[in-house]
Image (cartoon, grey):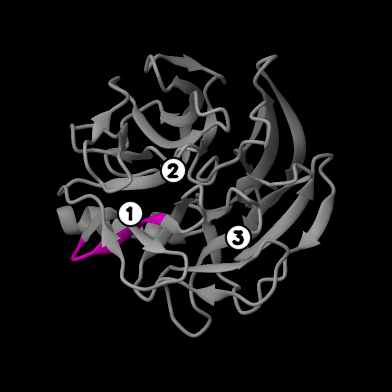
Amino acid sequence: MKRITLILLFLSHTLLAQVPEGKQVVSSLYIYTLETGESTLVMKEDRHFEAPNWSPDGTFLLINSAGKLEKIGLDGKNLGTLNTGEIQKANNDHGYTFDGKTLFISSGKPDVRGGSYIYKVDADGGTPELITELTPSYWHGVSPDGKDIVYCAQRNNNFDVYKISTEGGEEIRLTSESSLDDGPEYSPDGKYIYFNSSRSGMMQIWRMKPDGSDPEQMTFDNHSNWFAHISPNNKVATIITYIEDQKEGHPFGRQVKLRLLDLETMKIKDLTEEFYGGQGTINVPSWNPEGTHFAYVRYALKDM
């Protein structure tokens, strides 16, 4: 059963969506304003796109769709596809260094069926460089000094958190639980790596020191909580919460809501009502540079 669960999780990372026959995905890109608690619709299209990053200069959002990365203006205007060379199978795990100079992309290889490898490329695009030799590897975070990345990887039939130099080399395993550990992301001060884990029975948010020591549970409720994205002020994090327990999966097409986790008190408050989303909604860091707004995606289905 454990092996089947892991295979399904691998598929959930690589499939565009789990869409019922005869239906088409409608994707809506939103910007949430923390001060007012309002979500503003930026773009709505009859196609599937995912995982917005906010550009380091604050001028556009980066999404993935059909294996490529697109730049979307804050007014919803499509600013074109980012040049990423041979990368044509990008998935929804991508993001920038804190200084905004480098972009990391998880993608399949052009000549390999399936799989996910991590590449780096200049933030403005160019020729990608391979960082991870092993697959599957899914990028989720980078250290504030830009020297290391952290990622979720399946090795020996188990998904754990790993880190590796941004120059490549030997990967370092940071978690070793038999349960799933995923979504690692550095805090802006570099003191912690936040991640989600099912080690306590349900998927919850945890954090640990950068060497993998002293794991600490941060959420304790009866929902499946994923992907803690730390605000630039290092005080709060957005998380995506599945209303119904999804075990070790984070599928597309479920009822979810976005919540705000106070990193000092561990108190959580709702940011949105329940909506149709999940995989692709907010997989990666999506705060604006000031920490006043973040971006996310809602989905709907329509008859083809």
Q: Position of residue 1 (x, y in %)?
A: 14, 53
Tell me which segment is drawn in magenta: 150-157
Give the label on residue 103, or none: 3
Q: Residues within 10 Å of mark 1 (few under 14, many from 20)?
A: some
Residue at the extreme bottom of the image, as rendered: 111
153 part of magenta stretch: yes
Give, as a three-letter code, the residue at label 2. Answer: Tyr
User: Which of the two marks, 3 or 1, is nearer to us in this view?
Assistant: 3
Chief SS of the magenta region: strand
Query: Residue shown at 68%/31% (left/top)?
Result: 290
User: Which of the two marks, 2 or 1, is nearer to us in this view?
Assistant: 2
Left or right: 206 as drawn, with respect to 258: left
Residue 275 shows in the view: yes
Quarter where residue 7 is shown: bottom left
Give, as a three-letter code, the residue at label 3. Answer: Leu
Please tell me whether mark 3 sits on a helix, a strand or a loop: strand
